[in-house]
């Protein structure tokens, strides 16, 4: 159970997360994520290929027209839109984000029958053990408080059906130029989901290298991305055991 002092500590962390995103808006660093940026294109394609492999490798992916999926920290809804395009059904999808303006953007993008809920995922009452997939894509790297990370991971895990899992994508290295985020190394992901059977792959080139080389030529990006130690982001499947 969360105590009152824990709650106020978590409120502070939530306020700080909101401030960090506000700062991004004001500093216009959001342009770094423009779909016209050649690095963003490469990243999206690499991520898409990795999710394609995950869908082929899992029964949930193969039966995705029946799978229920919740994205915590869904942002402006781009991932949910892709899941729809890959054959997940709108009525089985749900999105949540802490920031109401992001939910407003997602609402404009996505079909009306996808529920989109604004608010902190930890205190939002989702049905327990209801989702085949709970997506956490670049959410934990912007949560700097370890206890809050653990509470949110436990909560996300409680929402997963037996036999389902958490689909995780995030970066593993710190960015010395950006103190508002921190890498989540593989061993930390394991700590956050101690009961999960974990499999993962490294997906795409770290931004400082990727941005430079993709501006020169996509071929350079693809060549360097053959070296796994240069890849900063992982796609991870954290599977919950089926009930016997
Ligand atoms: C970097 S964005 C990623 C958006 C999307 N998942 C993607 O991959 O494009 C991380 C999102 O997580 C949301 N977030 C952070 N902490 C959250 C929390 N406790 N509950 C719900 N959303 C949260 C932020 O508001 C932000 O929109």
Image (spheres, helix red, strand yellow):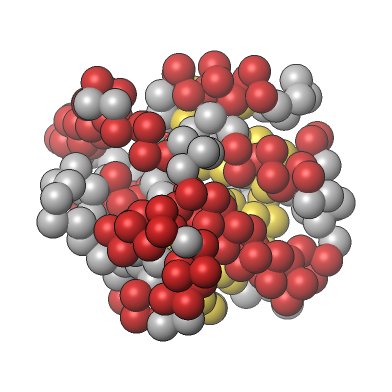
Residue 195 seen by the camera: no
Q: Say left or right for 42 vs 171.
A: right
**Percent x, y of residue 67:** 78, 53
At a point 76% along the width and 42% down the height, the residue shown is: 84
Relative horizontal placement of residue 196, taking residue 179 as reference (left or right):
right
Where is residue 161? Give x, y as percent: 66, 58
Image-based side of 24 in relation to 41, left or right: left
Q: Residue furthest front?
A: 216
Residue 229 visible to an observer of this rendering:
yes
Residue 164, image quadrant: bottom right
At 45% across and 70% down in the image, what residue appears? 220
Location of ligand 1 given as a quarter of the image: top left
Question: Residue sitting at 57 percent across and 63 percent down?
Answer: 46
Is residue 121 found left or right of 111 in the rendered image? left
Comparing 146 with 114, the one in front is 114
Q: Position of residue 25 (x, y in %)?
A: 30, 24
Query: Which of 219/116 is in front?
Result: 219
| Residue drawn at 83 percent across, 66 percent down | 62
Quarter in which the C terminus is drawn? bottom right
């Amino acid at each position: 159970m969360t105590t009152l002092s824990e709650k106020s500590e978590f409120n502070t962390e939530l306020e700080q997360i909101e401030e960090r995103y506000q700062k991004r808006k004001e500093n216009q660093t959001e342009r770094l994520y423009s779909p016209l940026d050649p690095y963003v294109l490469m990243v999206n394609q690499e991520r898409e290929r990795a999710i394609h492999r995950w869908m082929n490798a899992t029964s949930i992916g193969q039966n995705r027209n029946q799978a229920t999926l919740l994205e915590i920290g869904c942002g402006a809804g781009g991932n949910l839109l892709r899941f729809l395009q890959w054959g997940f059904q709108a009525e089985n999808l749900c999105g949540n984000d802490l920031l109401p303006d992001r939910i407003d953007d997602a609402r404009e993008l996505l079909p009306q029958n996808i529920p989109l809920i604004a608010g902190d995922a930890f205190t939002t009452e989702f049905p327990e053990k209801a989702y085949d997939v709970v997506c956490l894509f670049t959410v934990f790297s912007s949560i700097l408080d370890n206890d809050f990370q653990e509470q949110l991971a436990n909560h996300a895990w409680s929402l997963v059906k037996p036999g389902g899992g958490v689909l995780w994508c995030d970066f593993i290295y710190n960015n010395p130029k950006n103190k508002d985020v921190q890498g989540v190394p593989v061993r930390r992901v394991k700590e956050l989901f101690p009961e999960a059977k974990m499999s993962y792959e490294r997906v795409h080139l770290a931004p400082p290298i990727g941005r430079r080389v993709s501006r020169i030529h996509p071929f350079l990006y693809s060549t360097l991305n053959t070296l796994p130690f240069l890849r900063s982001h992982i796609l991870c499947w954290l599977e919950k055991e089926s009930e016997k």
